[in-house]
Amino acid sequence: MTSYPMLIDGKEMAGSATFTDQDPSTGRILAEVARGHPGDIDAAVGAARKAHERWRRTKPAERARILRRISELITRDREQLADLESRDTGKPLRQARADADVAARYFEFYASAIEVTYGDTIPVAPDLFVYTLREPHGVTAHIIPWNYPLQIGARTVAPALAAGNCCVLKPAEEAPLTAIQLGRLALEAGLPPGALNIVPGFGEEAGAALAAHPGIDHLSFTGSVEVGKLVSKAAAEHVIPVTLELGGKSPNVVFADADLGTALPVVVNSIIQNAGQTCSAGSRLLVESSVHDRVVAELVDRFQQVSLGPGPADPDMGPLISASQLQRVSSYVDLGKGEARAVTGGGPPGDSRLKDGFFFLPTVFDDVPPEAVIAREEIFGPVVAVTAFADLAEAIRLANSTDFGLVAAVWTRDVTTAHVMASEIQAGQVFVNTYGASGGPELPFGGVKRSGHGREKGLEGLLEFTRMKTVAMKLDTATYPGAA
Ligand code: ADP
């Protein structure tokens, strides 16, 4: 069995204990991983602090050069990383390849961005010269989930490093392998030891120790609302800024005038991608009444054609991440059967070849009342809740009827409908006649309401990892030529 270490201060460390990492397609053990404990977190934060003294003074062009090199190494190892990600998370190989490509893009994008990020001068008065500096926070902590370890790992550390921070990254216990591999590639690329420390381990142990550590200056968290609240409270003890990305219950809103032939495959993909275990999954489908029956019939037909299998076999959809996730999705679906009509799916597949993995059939619930639990809570599985609407006002009301607000998509040919929806929907991203924009590192991403706060991706994502300093310098105006 392969062993995976922690990476602290540029060194691979076995740690005093280990945990096992499971292959969700087969239930078999995939790797043995170092189990970070609070002492390791302390060492990693110390190493990051030490490295930061040098890294923050490194020229942006030099930081950019190293980040570009990391991007190149991810691309060099694309197949190996994709295979590892596919085995660790269960996701289809082509999705894992896309994740590796997007991870490489994050490093490339933020390498470019840091070279053109400047402060301002503020012309207040002739005798006051005012300018602003964007400085790194210092040591940044990054706690990430298991659904996109490589992509989210890159999304959060690339801008932090670009801005001059040094990082401690804690991947999720369910899928830590590609994040560890990313740390190795960063070292190979020439990132100074200690600038990116990777400490795998359990949430309540390594994660909680990291969030509460007095030596961190910023915390970036992607995961559940419950844990988001916990880590926010821990960070509040030290009054540090926090970026939270906490998931969603994102709607596809399909109007009768939409190009249904284009919309439907995208709507299906938005929920089956990563077996629905995506923060921005299109887990609700709001459809105008006059096309409801047609849309649902086609949706069911497409769901029934989705192929299931182990990630590396590259099916349409892989398994859920773990037995407990399977249990969670099954409970929601059982509950949903009392709230709405399950029209396809509704349980694990019958195929005996899949019996050891954590597979669940793509499931459609129709006629879901907006107050139903399955219409409001994040299930994190391949389950879509369909609700019909009569008009634009009802579409807006339904779109905003959950506590979440991460992403939404509007499908219409009418430009006014598109603009009104984009303006009225409470979400961090609204797509019109598309969904997700292929990961789009350029597009600011984040939530409103319980989906979180702060923005990742895009230039906004870089600025989150800086703090602004204003310098005001009093000048002696008598020195100006011609001054009296
Ligand atoms: P999910 O529902 O996606 O598993 P979690 O919020 O449980 O989301 O996990 C996201 C990340 O938060 C993982 O890296 C996990 O180890 C970590 N985590 C879980 N519990 C805690 C905690 N009490 N403190 C800090 N991190 C935690």
Image: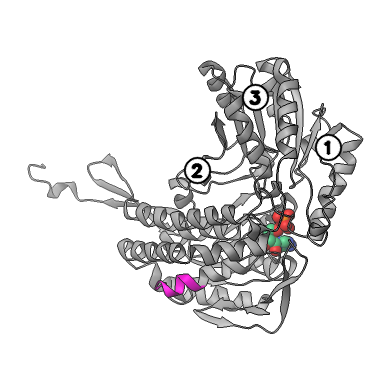
Magenta stretch, residue numbers: 184-191
Q: In the drawing, does residue 127 fall left or right of residue 243?
A: left
Left or right: residue 24 versus residue 443 is: right
Q: Which residue is mark 1?
A: 373
Which sits in the foreground, 275 or 156?
Answer: 275
Residue 302, given in percent of the width and then of the height, sits at 70, 35
Q: Position of residue 233 (x, y in %)?
A: 69, 56
Reading the chain from its start, which is encountered first: label 1 or label 3? Answer: 3
- x and y percentages locating residue 456 in the rendered image: 52, 49
- List the residue tagged with mark 3: 254
In this rendering, the label closer to the viewer, 3 or 2: 3
Asked whether residue 171 appears in the rendered view, the answer is: yes
Where disc 3 sits, the SS reads strand
**Foreground disc of the pair 1, 3:** 3
The CA span between labels 1 and 2 is: 29 Å
Mark 1: amino acid:
Val
- Residue beneath label 2, please? 444
Q: Residue at x 58, y 38 (%)?
A: 428
Is the CB atom of the residue marked by disc 2 within 8 angstroms of ligand 1's nearest atom? no
Please state the quadrant of the image where ligand 1 appears. Answer: bottom right
Answer with the quarter of the image where residue 239 lies.
bottom right
Frontmost residue, 59 versus 198: 198
Indicate whether residue 103 is drawn in magenta: no
Q: Residue at x 76, y 29 (%)?
A: 386
Q: Please report whichever mark, 3 or 2, sits nearer to the chain's N-terminal start.
A: 3
**295 vs 125, nearest the viewer:** 295
Label 2 amino acid?
Pro
How many residues crowd around disc 2 within 10 Å: few (fewer than 14), some, or many (20 or more)?
A: some
